Image (cartoon, rainbow, N blue to C red):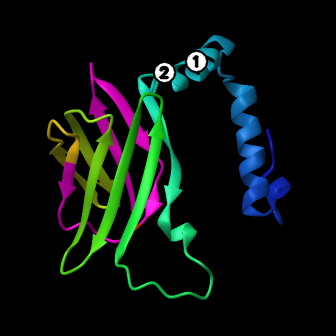
Amino acid sequence: MTNTADFEGMSDDELLVELGEALRLADPVPSLVTELVKAGHGLRTIDTEYAELVFDSAMEELVGVRSDSSTREVTFRAPGIEIEVAVVADDRRRIVGQLVPPQQATLVLQYRDGSHEVESDSLGRFVFDEVPTGPISLRCIHGDNQVVQTDWVIV
């Protein structure tokens, strides 16, 4: 049995390391369980294609030059689809976008405190009204339930 005096003067981090080691020795996780968890982790998004940010007008502005434009254009690309969006900051903040090639799809705008869903029209156009400031991501469900998820960008 270990004496509590053995732990005096140890930092919280050191105590956590000791506790973790004791738990690993007393009840180790079977290797099959570890392998299954690692294999299953990749399956949680196996049907999701990630769209890469390929253009952001905020990155194109010249240093030291002020723009009068209140519209930011962003384009994401995944195999077989592009999601082009314009973040418009006029009297209300909104996202106006289009899918290329044009198609009907369900789009979900994800943000810090929730999400909002819209349908694109047959030309691939869609609008999200009253978009909050902060990080956002778009999820596009198109075709035969193909899912495309964009990177997070701050708007």
- The main secondary structure of the magenta stretch is strand
Q: Residues within 10 Å of mark 1 (few under 14, many from 20)?
A: few
Q: Residue furthest top?
A: 32
Q: Which mark is residue 43?
A: 2
Seen at 65% across and 15% down, the residue is 30
Residue extent of the magenta highlight: 126-154
Compared with 145, 60 (above or below) is: below
* For residue 86, above or below residue 18: below
Label 1, label 2: how many angstroms apart (C-alpha)?
A: 7 Å
Residue 60 pos. (x, y %): 56, 68
What crowding class fits label 2: few (fewer than 14 Cα within 10 Å), some (14-19), or many (20 or more)? few
Residue 149 in the magenta stretch? The answer is: yes
**Figure quadrant of the N terminus:** top right
Q: Check if mark 1's residue and mark 2's residue have beta carbons within 8 Å.
A: yes
What residue is shown at x 76% (from left), y 37% (from top)?
Answer: 21
| Residue wearing tag 1 | 39
Image vertical order of residue 21 relative to residue 41, above or below:
below
Which amino acid does the dot numbered 2 rest on? Leu
Which residue occupies the foreground of this view, 102 or 117?
Answer: 102
Q: Nearer the viewer, residue 100 or 44?
A: 100
